[in-house]
Image: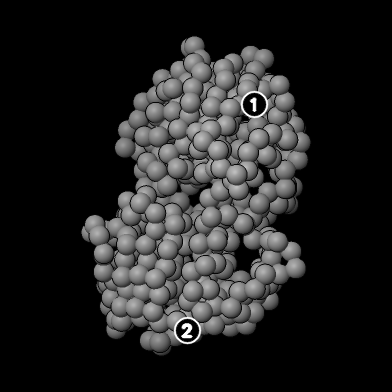
Amino acid sequence: MTDASHPTPYLDLAPVRNARGTVSLPGSKSISNRVLLLAALAEGRTRVTGLLDSDDTRVMLAALRTLGVNITQGERPDEVLVEGCGRFHVGRADLFMGNAGTAIRPLTAALAMMGGHYLLHGVPRMHERPIGDLVDALRMLGACVAYQGKEGYPPLSIGWGELNLSRPVKVNGSVSSQFLTALLLAAPLATRSAGRDFVIQVEGELISKPYVDMTLNLMRRFGVTVERDGWQRFVVPASAVYRSPGQMLVEGDASSASYFLALGAIGGGPVRVTGVGRDSIQGDVAFAHTLEAMGAQVEMGADWIETRGVKVAEGGRLKAFDADFNLIPDAAMTAAVLALYADGPCRLRNIASWRVKETDRIHAMEAELSKLGATVQSTPDSLTVTPPASWRPAEIGTWDDHRMAMCFSLAAFGPVAVRILDPGCVSKTFPTYFDVYAGLVEA
């Protein structure tokens, strides 16, 4: 198939009928980048295993090293040793953040709370992804953050500020949960210098709550317990100090699991993923319940999930759905492509966050599903997909979005040839995706 180390302009996927096998998942991007920052800010050394090797984690590793964090390669390719430094020792740096939201947002908060002379920037799409709600919250604290281009978006410069924790800091929760996560992860830096609690008040409806839960879980593992009053008020205690747990194992990526679990649902199966299961701290494991609602058989263990289902290439159909995907927006993209094989129109609701991801995913998904013959209608926060009455061969644009490339591999179970443009974009989170996919499917 293809490998991100040998980029190619397109990848042709011939129609396939069956899928079966077992996949050992790469590490979670969301957990990997959170753990790297926590380990850097903690007292002591942390051995991180199961670390994802991808564009986004390389960006975070490079930034932390530039900031003076001692990170060495472990005995295995997915292992690093991080020497915690409490605070970054380098006070001036130019940091390229690629298109990694899980890196630029928490680092912006951490650097702003420390103060210094920093510039954070990325690829052109990063400069179109909003960060204004986080900057507003940091400025409310007294941090010095300035826009170097368009108001509300990177690039950003950070200077010295004087933090004031005498009143709660307010942050909008309705655009991205990463803004709240960034404040939470960086909060112990402020409590240490101010000697008082750090109180965060969320304004608006907080989206993607499972990702915030993940953040709180990982903070606890590094010795900081946050008091939470519903989803509106969070208190990081004045005594908060990160201390290394010694070793951290990164779970398999539950968002990436969705593609393989979907293969089992439409290709007969069984397809099993290992590295994530019933004990996962990731919200996207709930995608297994979405597949059950669509008619798939799902079994789950502590660290594995297995699916079996219909064979859509032989006329089988999934059950249509009308569901709220606010809690699992990444895995929802997989459901949108599965709608091609449903027995009626499918509606994905409460997915406004798609518009500020790696691309405007509502617009991109509407455009690419339509190419295959589906009838697609969109609103600012929803997508309705009616399966094709007549399939059409298509070149699928991936919009420089790794998840577009991966989820549209499922379109190969239709009766037409599918070409994936720029398949190498999967390097953002899963460089070997198409090789793993090829090992599971057959004509």
Mark before the other along the chain sequence, 1 or 2: 2
| Other residues around mark 2 within 10 Å, as few (<14) / some (14–19) / many (≥20) | few
Residue 365 in the image: x percent, y percent? 43, 32
| Other residues around mark 1 within 10 Å, as few (<14) / some (14–19) / many (≥20) | many
Left or right for 139, reference 85:
left
Which is more toward the observer, 14 or 270?
14
Q: Point out the image quarter for the C terminus.
A: top right
- Residue 141: tell me if it is visible: no
Q: Which mark is residue 347?
A: none
Residue 326 in the image: x percent, y percent? 44, 44
Left or right for 357, reference 407:
left
Residue 352 in the image: x percent, y percent? 36, 42
Could you tell me how far apart the alpha carbons at marks 1 and 2 are, in whole angstroms?
A: 52 Å
Where residue 2 sits, quadrant-wise, is: top right
- Residue 155: tell me if it is visible: yes
Is label 1 in a helix, a strand or a loop? helix
Dot 1 amino acid type? Ile
Dot 2 amino acid type? His
Q: Which color mode does the image show?
A: one colour
Q: Label 2, on which residue?
A: 89
What residue is drawn where x is 58% and y is 83%?
Answer: 43
Residue 37, placed above or below residue 163: above
Residue 438, placed above or below residue 128: above
Residue 116, placed above or below residue 431: below
Q: Label 1, on which residue?
A: 266
What residue is drawn where x is 42% and y is 23%?
Answer: 370
Where residue 267 sits, quadrant-wise, is: top right
What residue is drawn where x is 52% and y is 82%?
Answer: 86
Q: Point out the image quarter for the N terminus.
A: top right
